[in-house]
Amino acid sequence: MLNAIILAVSAIIGVSLLLNLWRFMIGPHTLDRVIALDTMYINAIALIVILGIFMESPLYYEGALIIAMLGFVSTTAVCKFILRGDIVE
């Protein structure tokens, strides 16, 4: 039963990733692309956590944490670049 639920949730998150990729490719504005990329990070984290539940290994959670930190820092840097034109003051 748990395997079927994990498979269904993985498929739903995979569809969400494809829709985010579509928005990233055709987004009319730069901010649409930044939000789509940020949402793709969140979906990737969810897939890694689901894989960790399926494999029963805590190493996947550490990988998800690393991706979350990189996603936050990169989104912040891109937004700062869009607003100010430079990243480092």
Image: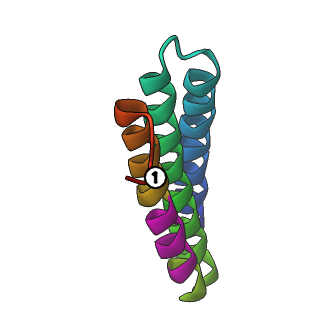
Q: Which residue is mark 1?
A: 42
Residue 18 in view of the camera: yes
Q: Position of residue 81 (x, y in %)?
A: 44, 39
Q: Residues within 10 Å of mark 1 (few under 14, many from 20)?
A: some
Side of 82 relative to 8 (left or right): left
Secondary-structure class at tag 1: helix
22 or 55: which is nearer to us?
22
Q: Position of residue 20 (x, y in %)?
A: 55, 32
Q: Position of residue 42 (x, y in %)?
A: 46, 52
54 or 61: which is nearer to us?
61
Query: Which corner quadrant of the image does residue 4 belong to?
Result: bottom right
* Residue at the spot 53% in from the left edge and 88% down from the top edge: 58
| Count of number-bearing discs | 1
Side of 27 relative to 86 (left or right): right
Q: Residue furthest front?
A: 89
* Residue at the spot 58% in from the left edge and 27% down from the top edge: 24
Residue 1 in view of the camera: no
Query: Which corner quadrant of the image does residue 86 belong to?
Result: top left
Q: Residue furthest top?
A: 28
What colour scheme does the image use?
rainbow
The span picked out in magenta is 62-70
* Residue at the spot 54% in from the left edge and 17% down from the top edge: 27
Query: Which corner quadrant of the image does residue 25 belong to?
Result: top right
Q: Is residue 80 covered in magenta?
A: no
Q: Position of residue 48 (x, y in %)?
A: 58, 66
Q: Amino acid at mark 1?
A: Ile
* Residue at the spot 55% in from the left edge and 22% down from the top edge: 23
14 or 24: which is nearer to us?
24
Relative to 64, is 10 above or below? above
Relative to 62, is 18 above or below? above
Q: Main secondary structure of the magenta part?
A: helix
